[in-house]
Amino acid sequence: MMLTVITFKWSTPGYRSKYDATHVNTMQRMVARHYPHPHRFVCVTDDPAGVECETWPLWDDLASVPNPTWPDRGPSCYRRLKLFARPSLGRWVWLDLDAVITGDLSPLWTRPEPVVTYRPPGLNGGVNGAMILCNEPERFRFVWDLFDPDVSPKETTRLGYRGSDQAWMTACLQHCSGKWGEAEGCYDYSGLRKPAMRMRASGSARRQVNLPADARIVFFHGKPDPWEVDDSWVLDNYK
């Protein structure tokens, strides 16, 4: 069954990062270079101008539910959960725009588990919303159906889970999903940057961040964004 690759782009006044059509188009090109299998690339957006791929209009469901972890500055991404209510999509993967693809995605996106989630070291086993693969969406409609905008964010906070939709997905999926992490070539840029930052603190000039040889995709959580970085491997791949 063909895979649908889904990205999201919407405007959030005051948010730390600004996304535009060039970021969607760049991601589409990176996926095309590194996923040599039939796939459909879609952007869910409130502004399709300049976007070169297929677009779907952004829905308003859950748009006003605040992020319980960082109410003032954190993104509210609950609306993405609605993908779990669309089993007719077949196999899908959602992918954040602030990432750089550096290697073959086939081993990541041809995994056989019903659902696979990204688990970076900093979340202590929690689900990160940067990338999720759902092979059997009919089995996971409960992720959408059970979400209560008044109750669910409070429950995830009580359980110690951080974020908006990723906190809810941790509650729903952490024990029933396959995992991606550094062992599978999925890295967090902030983790890769720490050795270079320590060297810079000694008084030397800015150090290039090294890319691990087995890296397939690097996620940029927070700042900087990929388009703000001049590391050679970012410039070679983010285009």
Image (spheres, grey):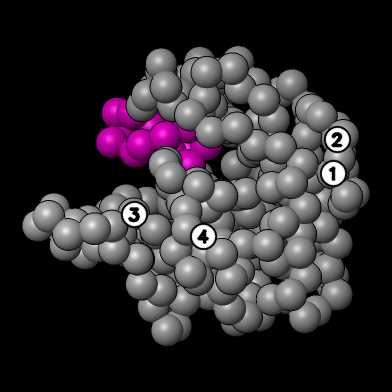
- The residue that label 3 is drawn on is 190
Does 82 sit above or below residue 194?
above
Nearest to N terminus: mark 2 or mark 4: 2
Badge 3: how crowded within 10 Å, few (<14), some, or many (20+)?
Answer: some
Nearest to N terminus: mark 3 or mark 2: 2
Residue type indicated by callout 2: Pro
- The residue that label 1 is drawn on is 51
- Residue 66 lies left or right of residue 47; in this view the side is left
Badge 2: how crowded within 10 Å, few (<14), some, or many (20+)?
Answer: some
The image shows residue 223 at horizontal and vertical percentages of: 41, 41
- The residue drawn where x is 9% and y is 57% is 202
Question: Who is closer to the viewer here, 201 or 5?
Answer: 201
Q: Find the distance from the CA under tag 1 to the CA under tag 4.
A: 27 Å
Q: Judge depth for marks 1 and 4 and give the one in front.
A: 1
Q: Find the distance from the CA under tag 1 to the CA under tag 3.
A: 28 Å
- The residue that label 2 is drawn on is 48
Question: Who is closer to the viewer here, 214 or 229?
Answer: 229
